[in-house]
Image: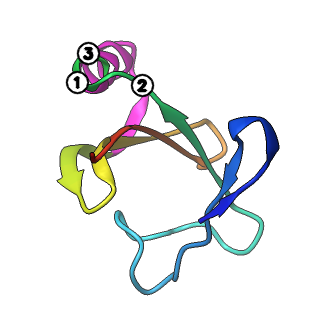
Amino acid sequence: MFQMGSGFRLALWNVAQVEPRATLAPGGGELCAVVEADQVRALHDAWAARGVAIAQAPTRLDFGFTFVALDPDGHRLRVFNPAM
């Protein structure tokens, strides 16, 4: 992960190790949003109730508590609370 200006971070995943498994051909992407711990599950539930495709249910990974949704084009929308 590369720390950029203004709090922006750029992270690169190894396609063989990313969770959940990447399914888009080259050109796909993942946008991440950092939220408070109690918001991870609340946003997951709200988005799922609206019919947003969920690629990964709320789970704990080495970097924090997270879930992954998909936009209409299949790009990943990761919501997470960083591990402390």
**Marker disc for residue 14:** none
Question: Can you give x and y, in whole percent of width and height, for residue 32 in the image?
Answer: 55, 42
Vertical arrangement, residue 40 with respect to residue 10, above or below: above
Its colouring scheme is rainbow
Question: Can you give x and y, in whole percent of width and height, for residue 23 in the image?
Answer: 51, 68
Residue at (26% x, 26% y) in the render: 37
Question: Can you give x and y, in whole percent of width and height, for residue 10 in the image?
Answer: 69, 58
Q: Nearer the viewer, residue 58 or 48?
A: 58
Q: Amino acid at mark 3?
A: Ala
Element carrying mark 1: helix
The residue labelled by disc 2 is 35
Is residue 13 shown in magenta? no
User: Do the residues under discs 3 and 1 have CB atoms within 8 angstroms?
Assistant: yes
Residue furthest bottom in the image: 16
Vertical arrangement, residue 17 with respect to residue 75, above or below: below
The residue labelled by disc 3 is 42
Residue at (59% x, 65% y) in the render: 1
Question: Counting other residues with Cα less than 10 Å from the Cα at mark 1, is it few (<14), some (14-19), or many (20 or more)?
Answer: some
First to last magenta residue range: 40-55
User: Do the residues under discs 2 and 3 have CB atoms within 8 angstroms?
Assistant: no
Q: Is residue 27 left or right of residue 70?
A: right
The residue labelled by disc 1 is 41
